[in-house]
Amino acid sequence: MSAVSSAVKSSVAPIHGLHHFAWRCRDAEETRHFYEDLLGLPLAHVIKADRVPSTGEYCPYVHVFFEMKDGSYIAFFDLGDNEAAAPSPNTPPWVNHLALRMNTIEEVIDAKKRLEAAGIDVIGVTDHGFIHSIYFFDPNGIRLELTAENLSEQQAADFKASAHAELAAWTKEKAGRAKAPAA
């Protein structure tokens, strides 16, 4: 770790967790049905305003929050124009996603059955070696992952201990590929 990153790391107040992840939705009621009725996340708060508090710009919206068991939220902005956020043109659709943790693999399997019964296309259960996951899209085109860990505390500690070395190896490999002549 560099001296700069050590100094920054020691001076940053700790982040205690996620408060909310916010995204644009096409329709707040359609989104409510999906997150509350299908995923079981209760609608916990609604903000309706005509001006954006941080910028002051005029943009009528409703901001809806769905609460997870740990007290964090998934939130959405309905801008009233029936438009969902456009996918990124330079990123495959499987890359950007929101992974939500469940307690057990059995809960993930039950969720898969419930979603499929509601007509949602689900990929998985996929075994990643440390988690088991299912993947599907919400009505706004957001890829979601429901996942449950299947690793011991020691395995988790081992992953954390090797994370910087693994990233350094990837960075070196990536740099080597950039310098290699095109095939």
Image: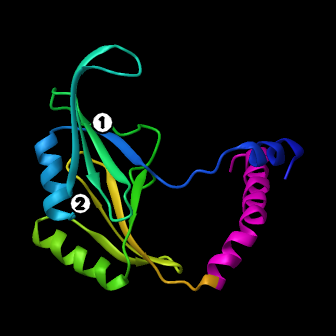
Q: Tell me the magenta residue range.
A: 154-183
Q: Residue at x 72, y 59 (%)?
A: 167
Left or right position of 144 against 132: left
Q: Within the magenta stretch, is there residue 164? A: yes
Q: Does the magenta stretch include residue 145?
A: no
| Marking on residue 41 | 2
**For numbered disc 1, what is the local secondary structure?**
loop
Q: In this view, does 174 lie above or below 151?
A: above
Q: Residue 85 carries which label?
A: 1
Position of residue 92 in the picture relative to residue 121 (left or right)? right
16 or 149: which is nearer to us?
Answer: 16
Whole-percent x, y for residue 132 in the image? 42, 78
Helix, strand or loop: magenta stretch:
helix
Q: Local crowd at mark 2 within 10 Å, few (<14), some, or many (≥20)? A: some
Residue 120 shows in this picture: no
User: Picture coordinates of residue 160 (x, y %)?
Assistant: 69, 70
Circle 2: element type: loop
Q: Which residue is drawn at 24% across and 53% down?
A: 138
